[in-house]
Amino acid sequence: MSLYLLYTLIPLVWLVISATKTQPDLLSTPGLSFGGVFALFDNIRQTFTYDNGVFLRWLGNTLLYVVVGAGGATILATAAGYGLAKYRFRGRQAVFAVVLGAIAVPATALAVPTFLLFSRLGLTDTPLAVIIPSLISPFGLYLIWVYATDAIPDEMMEAARIDGAGEIRIFLAVTLRQLVPGIVTVALFAVVSTWNNYFLPLIMLSDPNWFPLTVGLNQWSAQAIGAGAQPIYHLVITGSLLTIIPLVIAFLFLQRFWQSGLTAGSVKQ
């Protein structure tokens, strides 16, 4: 356990310490020791102002992709997973097989066919080329499907129908609250996946104004290679540290929803 904690925390500690160094200190001092000057706040200022403040635009692009892409994926997975779990219809098992198959296919294997499709539609180098593929989450659908099967008793839905509630009202007013832990879990997976998405935006986008943080920071890192190179490793590292802060806040804020769902159904009434 201690080794696991060290293996997990040392890269994060290195990132935090390195973000406090100037460019010369970063290249001349050991990774886990501080430099001669504490330059964290100056690095943050430079990160937000370098190249006319393009980092702020990349941050805005990433938030756009996360809010629309991950938010849409969560809504679609919730609706589809709930429907597949609680309603019986012809072809349901076939859908189940397709979903399981989609989970097994790595996203990188679909990147090139997706690029060719969006190129034919004329959507490459636009935000839609990143947002639309992000809306599909087979794993999220499967997670909601499994969770809804156990968390929502059929008897509760039947009682609501006897009281005169329609199917949409049952979903919104009766069962949605029961699904909150599962929805939060799916939302976090979708947010992390979209926030860290690198390969798809890399092949879909060529205009730096539409880059997310992952691709933009890699472009800054690539400036250190070739003739007339201008290495800005200290800004790349500071930008990386700023990039993970929203994810840490999201985990800390939403963990109580996980904790409330972990014990659901653990006690027999």
Image (cartoon, grey):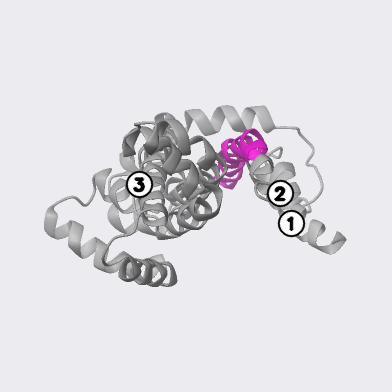
Tell me the residue at 74%/56% (across/down). Answer: 8
**Is residue 168 depicted above or below 232 in this figure?**
above
Query: Could one spot residue 225 in this view of the protein?
Result: no
Query: For residue 234, which quarter of the picture?
Result: top right
Labels 3 and 2: the sequence-earlier one: 2
Callouts 3 and 2 close, C-beta under 8 Å? no
- Is 199 or 54 nearer to us in this picture? 199
**Front tag of 3 and 2:** 3
Please name the amino acid that badge 2 sits on. Answer: Leu
Q: Is residue 222 left or right of residue 43?
A: left
The residue where tag 2 is placed is 12
Rate crowding at label 3 as few (under 14), some (14 to 19) or many (20 or more) other CA atoms within 10 Å: some
Give the percent coordinates (x, y) of residue 182: 54, 46
- Is 126 or 48 nearer to us in this picture? 126
Magenta stretch: give its range. 231-257
The residue where tag 3 is placed is 76
The residue where tag 1 is placed is 8
On residue 221, the disc is none
- Is 34 or 158 nearer to us in this picture? 158
**Is residue 132 depicted above or below 257 in this figure?**
below
Real-space CA distance between mark 2 and mark 1, rounded to the nearest whole angstrom: 7 Å
Tell me the residue at 78%/41% (across/down). Answer: 35
Q: Does the magenta run of residues contain 254?
A: yes
Please name the amino acid that badge 1 sits on. Answer: Thr
Q: Tell me the quadrant of the picture where the N terminus can be found.
A: bottom right
